[in-house]
């Protein structure tokens, strides 16, 4: 499966995870073999990861999300877009995001 | 376009191998996470903490909690419950049905948690694992029996009675093991005891035997410590350490016989003799002038064993102050004559 995301890719949280904001963290539990296995593997995101996650609504493209974030953060839009695409690709690779 | 907001750092995802490791969620956080998974219709597998369900569920066991899928739980089920008063998550047993709810109680608790409505029962424990293996946790029909015992104080009384029996049996065993006849027969029947340097797996087995409440943590190799185990028929029956502290001052300086332990059922078979011998040999080979140890004053069998190997109580030694009031400092002189 190609996990490389592009600016026009639209992503949404996968059906095979449960994600909750708990105590300031986005905690992601993969549903492996039909079980939410908190003893095996959990994921959390850093601050900018949470900012990207909050905008992954299954409608906006990753390019649009990068553009929105460049209005909030002190950085070049190109650099933000590059890291957003890398981040989304990593999450697609782990089965946390699915491409819509 | 650049905004005037916070600096951008690349977003990242981080995996945590275990809940309770680096990512520490509060009880409320765990409740939220469990509820989210169960509400989605999936079982939730997590490490449980505490001793309130001992002996059936122990600290750091891994429990799988399944959603109820609309069915009513039954008396005796071990369930994940959000206590209505405090909002705390507990994994306890339903010991009785009440009007519109359940009486919930931990198997190791003298008092129930109280009455909880159906809506607070989140899921039912369907599997308990300990060190990677499924264990019996009285989850099926036996759960009803445990619940019946636990409704009053019967389970607490049964456990106290069994503990008393264990203490009495232990005392009787020690008396029998101290008799010369038993010792002669046991040594003959027991056969060969092999003493070997303890590898990582053996150290973990010894740790789990002696400190079942503490998780095993591998220590980096220390050239000043040698660990041995005694094996009878491949099974570990004893442990001892030789510790060299390369310091010239302080009460803990020098060479020590440390942490000698023989499994209670295997005492009187000469295992302690073999372990003491191997440490004494090691100390001599290392050129030690003396070998020290601490032993509890009321452990008369161990004191006799050490005296047999030449150790003597050294109450007048300044290093005897290393011992607490309950411990006796003993020393074996290894100085060669002439």
Image (cartoon, coloured by chain):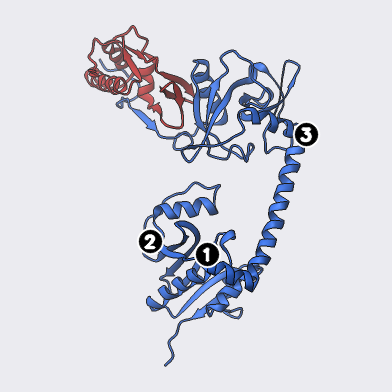
**Residue closer to the observer: B191 or A90:** B191
Label for residue B190?
1
Confirm whether residue B205 shows in the render.
yes
Q: CA distance from mark 1 to mark 2?
A: 33 Å
Label for residue B222?
2
Q: Position of residue B195 (x, y in %)?
A: 43, 65
Q: Position of residue B177 (x, y in %)?
A: 63, 66
Count residues near mark 3 (Cα–Cα under 10 Å), then give few for <14, some for 14-19, many for 20+.
Answer: some
Confirm whether residue B323 shows in the render.
no
Quadrant, the C terminus of chain B:
bottom left
Which chain did the image draw in blue?
B
Q: Is residue B102 left or right of residue B241?
A: right
Whether discs 1 and 3 lie on one chain: the answer is yes
Q: CA distance from mark 3 to mark 2?
A: 52 Å
**First-in-chain label (1 vs 2):** 1
Q: Secondary structure at mark 1?
A: helix
- Chain A shade: red
> Circle 3 sits on which residue?
B152
């Amino acid at each position: 499966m190609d996990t490389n995301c592009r600016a026009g890719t639209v992503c949404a949280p996968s059906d095979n995870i449960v994600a909750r904001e708990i105590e300031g963290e986005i905690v992601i539990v993969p549903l492996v073999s039909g079980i939410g296995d908190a003893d095996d593997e959990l994921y959390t995101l850093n601050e900018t990861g949470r900012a990207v996650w909050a905008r992954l609504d299954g409608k906006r493209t990753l390019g649009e999300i990068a553009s929105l974030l460049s209005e909030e953060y002190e950085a070049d839009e190109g650099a933000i877009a590059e890291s957003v695409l890398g981040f989304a690709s990593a999450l697609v690779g782990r089965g946390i995001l699915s491409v819509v | 376009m650049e905004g005037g907001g916070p600096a951008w750092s690349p977003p990242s995802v981080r995996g945590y191998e275990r809940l309770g490791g680096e990512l520490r969620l509060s009880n409320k956080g765990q409740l939220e996470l469990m509820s989210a998974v169960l509400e989605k219709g999936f079982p939730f597998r997590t490490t449980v903490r505490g001793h309130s369900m001992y002996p059936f569920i122990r600290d750091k066991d891994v429990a799988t909690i399944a959603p109820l899928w609309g069915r009513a739980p039954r008396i005796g089920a071990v369930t994940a419950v959000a206590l209505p008063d405090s909002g705390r998550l507990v994994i306890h047993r339903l010991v009785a049905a009440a009007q519109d709810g359940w009486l919930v109680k931990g198997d190791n608790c003298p008092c129930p948690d109280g009455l909880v409505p159906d809506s607070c029962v989140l899921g039912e424990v369907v599997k308990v694992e300990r060190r990677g293996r499924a264990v019996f946790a009285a989850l099926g029909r036996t759960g009803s029996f445990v619940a019946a015992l636990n409704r009053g104080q019967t389970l607490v009384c049964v456990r106290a009675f069994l503990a008393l029996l264990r203490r009495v049996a232990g005392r009787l065993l020690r008396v029998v093991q101290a008799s010369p006849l038993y010792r002669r027969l046991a040594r003959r029947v027991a056969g060969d005891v092999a003493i070997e340097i303890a590898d990582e797996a053996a150290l973990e087995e010894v740790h789990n035997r002696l400190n079942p409440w503490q998780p095993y943590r591998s220590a980096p190799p220390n050239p000043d410590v040698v660990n041995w185990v005694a094996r009878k028929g491949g099974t570990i029956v004893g442990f001892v350490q030789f510790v060299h502290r390369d310091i010239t001052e302080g009460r803990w300086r020098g060479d020590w016989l440390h942490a000698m332990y023989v499994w209670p059922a295997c005492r009187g078979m000469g295992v302690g003799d073999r372990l003491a011998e191997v440490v004494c040999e090691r100390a001599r080979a290392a050129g030690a002038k003396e070998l020290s140890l601490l032993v509890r004053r009321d452990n008369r069998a161990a004191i006799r064993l050490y005296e047999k190997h030449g150790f003597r109580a050294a109450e007048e030694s300044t290093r005897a102050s290393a011992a607490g009031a309950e411990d006796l400092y003993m020393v074996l002189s290894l100085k060669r004559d002439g």
